[in-house]
Image: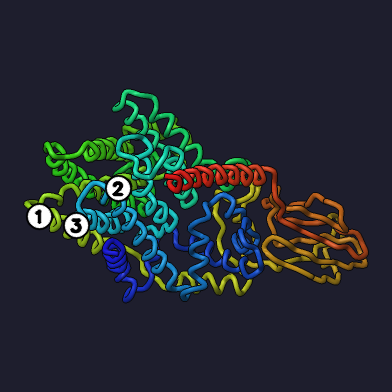
Amino acid sequence: MAALGVSLGTAFLIISPFFWRGTASGHDIAFHASSWLDVAGQWKEGIVFPRWCEWANNGFGEPRFIFYPPLSWLLGAALGFVVPWNAVPGTFIVLVQTLAGVSMFALARRFFPAGAALFAAACYTANPYALLVVYLRSDFAEELAWAFLPAFLLAALQRSGLMENRWGSGPRSAAIFGLFFAAIWLANAPAGVLASYSMALLFAWAAISEKSFLPLLRGAGGLALGFGLACFYLVPAAYEQRWVNIGEALSSGLRPVENFLFTKIADPEHNLFNWIASSVAILLKLLTWIAAALAYRNITEAQASWEKKALWQSLIVLGAAATLLMLRPSAILWEYLPELRFVQFPWRWMGILALAYACFGAAAVAPRRVAWIWCVVVILAMAGTATFLVRKAWWDSDDIPSLQEAISSGKGFDGTDEYDPAGDDHSNLPAKAPPVLLLPVEGGEARAAKAEIHIARWTAEEKDLSVTSPQPLRLAIRLLDYPAWRLEINGQPVKPEFPEGTTQVILPLPAGTEGIKVGFGRTPDRTVGNALSLASLAVCAAFLRKQRTRNQSQ
């Protein structure tokens, strides 16, 4: 309860400026808020797990929810049914940062006294990178992913053999490790990439320390189980990249080479933010390595346990890797290591470094003789960072109301470049279009076509309508084509036509009455992903049940 209270209190301190300044309107708030609103609207239509973002691209839609991990947009949408929409961002932050603090306490308490573990929880909840994310970035998904990281590290240390496994047998530790790993991937893909490389490094270090390949085998098994649990998201996200303009995720300003610490490009706004992020990174590095030096004095004492020494060494390895990968000399790694470039911003490694900072901080305050000095240093650093970022942040409470109005009026909101269907240029789409529009046949007279349209059902994933016309015409639907869409006219599948520059669905119709059905179907990759996740979940449940049965028999 003490850990919950400290974490909750710290989280409320973080959002305290929200009470008089409004909502911090960071870079990604429109993306996340629009996702929450879209998902909440689809739930009202009976769509439990959305795949198509209906109101993106001015209502023409995009397959956002196939590619963006689900946990954050599910949580944000759920909160919209509990609190007023303008309060959702602050509520989200309080919940997630409280979870982060409790997660850190669970890790730190295994190694340090309760007081030091509580200090670690507070440090992690309000670490400099978390403050940057809250006030300037509004990346709610990444924030959620880092909340799982301390518990994930605890599972990894036990799985690798670097500390005593108190969670039971090898299968049970693999199941717990896999669940946390999947949770990170299902919260935020860049954090998932960083967690994957970090754990690979940790298990490699364990193998070197123990002079055995066993930690590598344990790690590979746990990672494979975690990937399996997340396959319902990962398989479609990987396979369907060919169906969207995914390369736009690495357009100008978003490439790693342009975002190393203190890098400048021909964009003043980019340079300003990079300078702020780089300054926060330098502060976090200084705090981390000073705390590491103080912690080293403690773990070298004779009474220090081998587990504390293993933790210190592991965090040194992870912290050093995180420090290096924010700097330009690591550019070759960003170029050639698989998927690392899609992390985009090297300073995102601060998420890993913050873990080391909080743990080293707990070790630094364990001896009473220096505890108060380090506490004062940390409090001043956090207060100063928060004050600086609050002043640099843009505060605006109109983001969500504006999105709500755009949806209710049928206008929709901006789409995302990398999720735009292949062949489409969403900048060519009209700002506001009706659900359907009658067009003359190609080569025919330019006068407007006349027909009677009856819409029986119109949801994000299903459109059922009929058109009665005395002459042939074309029907333009407010929808972008995507391989998952199934288009039928009178029960027969058809191929749509497209206007120049976009992939808007246009259906040629003969004279008479035509029944049109459009449905978002399940593609084979999603079926495979679901099957792999269900199989992994069954394995996970069997591992946990096996341990419970064993405990009952003892």
Can you tell which quarter of the image residue 134 is in? bottom left
Q: What residue sits right under mark 1 in the picture? A: 373
Which quarter of the rendered picture does the N terminus lie within? bottom left
Mark 3 nearby-residue class (10 Å; few <14, some 14–19, many ≥20): some
Residue 450 appears anywhere in the view: yes
Q: Residue at x 60, y 46 (%)?
A: 534
Which of the numbered marks, if any, corresponds to residue 355? 2
Q: What residue sits right under mark 3 in the picture? A: 115
Task: Determine whether label 2 and label 3 are within 8 Å by CB.
Answer: no
Residue type at the position of mark 3:
Gly
In the image, taking residue 157 as reference, residue 490 lies left or right, namely: right
Can you tell which quarter of the image residue 120 is in? bottom left
Q: Residue at x 36, y 42 (%)?
A: 346
Q: Position of residue 428 (x, y in %)?
A: 63, 56
Which one is in front, 503 or 54? 54
Residue type at the position of mark 2:
Leu
Q: Is residue 141 above or below residue 318?
A: below
Please identify, in this view, whether the residue under mark 3 or under mark 1 is nearer the observer: 3
Q: CA distance from mark 1 to mark 2?
A: 21 Å
Q: Position of residue 437 (x, y in %)?
A: 76, 66
Q: Position of residue 69 (x, y in %)?
A: 52, 52
Indicate the secondary structure of the residue bearing disc 1.
Answer: helix
Q: Position of residue 384 (x, y in %)?
A: 20, 60
Which quarter of the rendered picture does the C terminus lie within? top left
Indicate the secondary structure of the residue bearing disc 2.
Answer: helix
Q: Is residue 119 above or below residue 40?
A: above
